[in-house]
Amino acid sequence: MKVPRLDYPVYTLDKRMLLPAGKPLTPDTLDALIKAHNGTPYQEIPFLEHGTVYKDILHLIRKPPYHIIFGKREKRTALRTMENICSIKPVLESLDYFKKSDFYTYRHILIVFALATILSQDLLENSQDWIIEAMAGQMHDFGKINVPLQILKKSNPLTRTDRNILEHHTLAGFVLLSYYLHDFRSFSARIAKDHHERRDGSGYPMGISLRDRMVEIISACDVYDALLSERPYRLTPFDNRTALEEITRMAQGCQLSWDVVKILVSYNRKDKPNLLECKVSKEKRGTPPANNLYGIIENEDPSTGGNQDT
Ligand SMILES: [Fe+2]
Ligand SMILES: [Fe+2]
């Protein structure tokens, strides 16, 4: 099996280097790192009780288009599940960091967490699995503490180097969560590593063919929310219809899971049909926003007018 290798070092939030660039992430490397962090396990703190998390989640799920997905029943179910989910101090500190420095990432983490909570109850049979899956939703982008804010908040196209640094958040999150949870096989660490992988192998960091229902739930929620969000590089976000068409296109192209996309479509319908009855239209009527710079890579060569300032 291919072993991932770090292109950049991994740092904690207080700038302590855990692993240098070039390190292969073998079980031995990760075991040694975990052993070096030989402390007592972190105290578990209820996630919803941290800071303004509860109030902020409520606010987010009441706003369009999420108010359609989170009807009365879904809201109750999501909150009841989330009430039982705990987190550890380093994760909560990263949340505080994002809330203060990059509000988009903060709200994105909260909404992916809430979405994953309800979707996983429909798609996973074992209740223990869906609680674990929902829990991991709050940590999926933890590694973004290793991405400079000027890249996370950049309003013009990323350069290839910016893009590589941004993609580093997957392996950085994997290393950080392995370290803090004392377990590199934990589901949260795997989610951090694999949530940008795709079924057709076109994702990153490893380009593996994603075949894991639990990870695929986070992947689809992640893409859906990214499309619906205002970003510095996109003046207007995707409207809900166009975002649903986009994830449908990705499911048709074998990037995202059909079942997860179907459930997202179903939650956007008033009668919320179940998975077997939900028919997804492949007709395209939406219009992607103008001036969407996502996915456009700027040339780094200054002679061609590229941007070198990161
Ligand atoms: Fe991510
Ligand atoms: Fe994300």
Image (cartoon, rainbow, N blue to C red):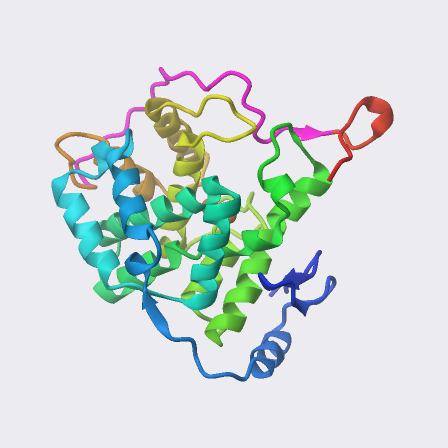
Q: Which secondary structure type mostly characterizes the magenta part of the structure?
A: loop
* Horizontal side of residue 280 vs 192, given as left or right: left
Q: Nearer the viewer, residue 209 or 151?
A: 151
The C terminus sits in image quarter: top right
User: Residue at the spot x=38%, y=54% of the render?
Assistant: 137
| Residue 223 in view here | yes
- Residue 176, by quadrant, is bottom right
Which of the two residues, 24 or 202, is positioned nearer the viewer here?
A: 24
Q: Is residue 279 magenta?
A: yes
The reply, left or right, for residue 230 in relation to residue 155 is: left
How far from the left and from the top, in percent, is residue 190?
A: 47, 62
Q: Position of residue 296 (x, y in %)?
A: 63, 28
The stretch in magenta equals 276-298
Does the stretch in magenta take in 78? Answer: no
Q: For this view, does 194 lie left or right of residue 79?
A: right
Reply above or below: 32 against 259.
below
**How many labels were placed on the picture?**
0
In the displayed structure, does residue 308 sit left or right of residue 171? right
> Where's residue 300, x and y in %?
78, 33
To which quarter of the image does residue 203 belong?
top right
**Is the N terminus in the top left, top right, bottom left or bottom right quadrant?**
bottom right
Residue displayed at 63% across by 68% down? 25
- Asked whether the viewer can see residue 198, the reply is no
Where 96 sits versus 280, above or below?
below
Q: Residue at x 21, y 32 (%)?
A: 68
Residue closest to the far right: 303
The correct choice, above or below, for 114 with respect to 40 in the image is above
